[in-house]
Amino acid sequence: MDATHLEHMRDFLLVMGCLSLLFTYLLLQLHQDSSRSYKEVCAPVVERCCFLFNEIRPATSQQREKIAVKSSLLRQTSLSRWKRAVQLVIDRQAKQRGLLLFICLFLIS
């Protein structure tokens, strides 16, 4: 292992340790603020962890390819909010001009 890999690993472990302490503190605070036992406080967390470890699995390469194709198609077909707003204003102005033109032609004839 090179030095940069070891530094990244050390930083990762430091962050995970801090998150673990913070999470433990939050569970303790939740237990003290409520009149529930530790088992009742920790049960939802344990259920979520079991779900993450047992039910969620990594995507296969075929699934990843399908996801990549779908996301690229979505990026190509969907407009940003800004573009949609500008397009809406342009369409409204065009309709108003068309209506005004129709009224003018109607009044002239």
Image (cartoon, rainbow, N blue to C red):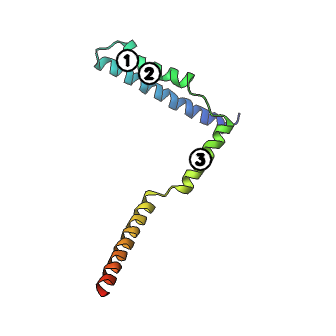
Q: Look at 41% across and 17% down and name the residue there.
A: 42
Where residue 104 sits in the image (x, y, percent)? 31, 83
Q: Nearer the N terminus, badge 3 or badge 1?
A: 1
Q: Which residue is mark 3?
A: 70
Q: Which residue is mark 1?
A: 41
Position of 52 with respect to 100 (left or right) is right
Disc 2 and disc 3 in contact, CB within 8 angstroms: no
Where residue 103 sits in the image (x, y, percent)? 31, 79
Q: Quadrant of the C terminus?
A: bottom left
Position of 70 with respect to 24 (left or right) is right
Q: Which residue is mark 2?
A: 45
Disc 2 and disc 1 in contact, CB within 8 angstroms: yes
In front here: 94 or 107? 107
Q: Nearer the N terminus, badge 2 or badge 3?
A: 2
Which residue appears farthest toward the front when viewing the image?
109
Q: Against 17, is 43 above or below?
A: above
Position of 31 with respect to 15 (left or right) is left
